[in-house]
Image: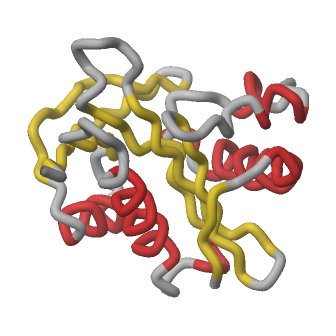
Amino acid sequence: MDVRVLKAADAAAFQAIRLRALQEHPEAFGASYEEEREFSLDKVAQGFNPPDSVMFGAFDRDALVGIAHLGRYTRMKTRHRAIIGAMYVAPEARGKQVGKALIDVSLSYARTLDGLEDVVLAVTVGNDTARNLYIKAGFTPFSIDPRYIRLGDRYFDIEWMVLRIV
């Protein structure tokens, strides 16, 4: 398995796995399949803008099997923080430490950013596999955001977590 920063040339592979994630687990993402399926590959590639916005991809041979985004807050008073989001591992790659590798690479990269102190993320309440991964990586829960995601007439809470990296 190879984990690396995605480039514009990876936009089609990223879009395919991202749309799959949004279809399979709509309760886990603020974005929707219906919104993102309309994105052009140019728009998708715009999200790959190091150093403050980095999309990581985990590859099994040539297949993209996992993704995670690290985005630094851009405003002066919040630049000490970054957020990990868009985390997804394809079912056929689960149980192979792909999620751990994505978190580890994201945090290693975060530690290289001057002045970055905290990394936050959110996990859908009930997604114990992801939650346990984040806790093992050192994240601490700090808040439940009720009814954050709405799918039709169902609501899903999310739990915010933080990791101090300095």
Q: Position of residue 89 (x, y in %)?
A: 57, 65
Residue displayed at 30% across by 54% down = 111
Q: Quadrant of the N terminus?
A: bottom right
Residue displayed at 83% across by 56% down = 13
Asked if 156 appears above or below 100 in the picture, the reply is above
Where residue 120 sits, quadrant-wise, is: top left
Asked if 119 appears above or below 68 in the picture, the reply is above
In-image side of 1 versus 20 (left or right): left
In-image side of 144 versus 121 (left or right): left
Q: How is the image coloured?
A: secondary structure
Q: How many marks?
A: 0
Residue displayed at 80% across by 74% down = 63
Asked if 163 appears above or below 71 in the picture, the reply is below
Residue 121 visible: yes
Residue displayed at 40% across by 73% down = 100
Asked if 164 appears above or below 138 in the picture, the reply is above
Q: Nearer the viewer, residue 111 or 82?
A: 111
Residue 90 visible: no
Q: Nearer the viewer, residue 72 or 113?
A: 113
In-image side of 15 versus 76 (left or right): right
Q: Position of residue 165 (x, y in %)?
A: 18, 52
Where residue 23 sits, quadrant-wise, is: top right
Q: Position of residue 85 (x, y in %)?
A: 46, 42
* Residue sitting farthest toward the front: 114
Q: Nearer the viewer, residue 67 or 8?
A: 8
